[in-house]
Amino acid sequence: MSFVTVPNFNHPLPPNGINSVPTLAGSSPADINGSGQWVAYVGEMPITATIDRLFFRIGSATTGCGALARIETVDTATGLPTGTLVHANASQSVTITSGGADYTVTFPGTFSIVKGARFAIVVAHNSGSPVAIRFSEFSDDNSGCGFPYMLDYDVSAGFRNQIALNWGLGVSGGSAVRLPFMWPINAVSNETFRASSTPDTIGNRFTLAAPMRICGVWAWLDLDDTATIHLYAADGATSLASVNLTASLPPNALANLNYHLFASSVELAAGTYYLAVEATGSANIGLATCTFPDASWRAGSPLGGADFVYATCTQAPTGTGDWTVTDTKQCFLGLIIDGIDDGAGGGGGGGETSHVFAS
Amino acid sequence: MNAGFTGLPEWLQVPFVPFQENVILLLDGGNDNLARRVVTAIYPPTGWTAEQITAFDEAKAEILAGIDDLMADAEANDPLRSPEAIALIEDAAERRSAS
């Protein structure tokens, strides 16, 4: 391995609208209230993939309805979904019955969408008299962007909105596509723990697809007492780096992003590691986490996809057996990278396990 | 896009000045509901007379009405509501019904 120094960047990226503890909620700008209404996410495919299903979560609903979940082409002149399917299999009816519920829609057959293709995921009213069906959104990542975008066709009001929908695009074989501002999750939490808790250490087990040099960490923490963030080797026991955190200074009752640097950067080969927050004080700290409808949707998470998975232990871990991995969860916890392998010298590289891009 | 902030007498603009730029940015971004909430949360300074407070309340109502007018204009001129876009939306609805 030979590393080239690069300006620090985060992998994965944290959400861009963080406001204290994480929140999911039914979104009034993303709703279906009557005949002819629809909500759409317009984006581009980051990979060529065989699609088999969609996920969406309804935050709240007064009266449900019949709906169509579809993937349509996009009109190049207006940016609107055309009503034309990307493939004959890309439409499936679904009955929305209640809020606070997950809906996984399996298409009648699989179909491929190629890398770079522009598409619209559309959930449209189909039958019945809906009242206030609101799609769930992750409000801590809804600052939005120009592209991709969300459209809410309400006939008389609303159109383009900055919403991070709790939707997902499923890949045949139990995976999912990672799309910017799309969060295929059904719950978020500010998990609280302290030095006397079991576990007292919560974080992510992660896999690097290529050698990288790590200079620090970011974490979405409610730091009401001290903590230590550890980077452990693949054996789950050997500490490669750590950074001690004081309680928030100045004191801050809210949860926020925290960026901290290790005393020295650490060169990591491709492989599996553990990054985790140990609570070291007598008062609770909080770490933001999210939950997926099932493990397959984690691949679609902006928080590192399938390569990052929730893991806990109680200090001090002596091996991988001391860690408990929960494959339906992730922590809002990631790496700050200051060096990448230039490929000289050979070795260290691994097969691609994920596609890395900004969310 | 000032929503009526600058048409007020100078003394009456004072309580609104700290919020004016943020409200305009919100309106530019299409966040009219949040802009209304910001304006609604502005209060007159301590010590103002009843007459001044009445003028303040009227100014606040005018600004809120100005936001409504701005948003109505923006919606009327939204390219996504052009005849071409509406025709496309209607065609798309027919295609959804048929497939």
Image: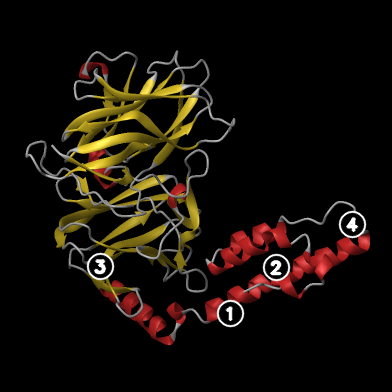
Which chain letter goes with mark 4? B
Mark 1 or 2, nearer chain start: 2
Q: Residue at x 89, y 57 (%)?
A: B48
Q: Which residue is mark 4?
A: B48
Which chain letter goes with mark 2? B
Which chain letter goes with mark 1? B
Q: Position of residue B98 (x, y in %)?
A: 26, 74
Does residue A246 sit above or below A26 in this rendering? above
Q: Circle 2 — which element?
A: helix
State which quarter of the image contains the N terminus of chain A: top left
Query: In the shown orientation, is residue B6 left or right of residue B23?
Result: right
Q: Amino acid at mark 3?
A: Arg
Q: Position of residue A262 (x, y in %)?
A: 35, 29
Q: Which mark is residue A118?
A: 3
Q: Residue at x 7, y 39 (%)?
A: A345
Q: CA distance from mark 1 to mark 2?
A: 14 Å
Does residue A174 sit above or below A267 in this rendering? below
Q: CA distance from mark 4 to mark 1?
A: 35 Å
Q: Which residue is mark 2?
A: B64
Q: CA distance from mark 1 to mark 3?
A: 31 Å
Q: Circle 3 — which element?
A: strand
**Identity of the residue furthest to the left in this view:** A346
Q: Nearer the viewer, residue A172 or B1?
A: B1
Q: Position of residue B65 (x, y in %)?
A: 70, 72
Is residue A328 among the parts visible in the rendering? no
Q: Nearer the viewer, mark 4 or mark 1?
A: 4
Q: Are marks 2 and 4 in contact (CB under 8 Å)?
A: no
> Few, some or many C-alpha atoms within 10 Å of disc 4 (few <14, some 14-19, many ≥20)?
few
Q: Are marks 1 and 2 in contact (CB under 8 Å)?
A: no
Q: Which mark is residue B73?
A: 1
Which chain letter goes with mark 3? A
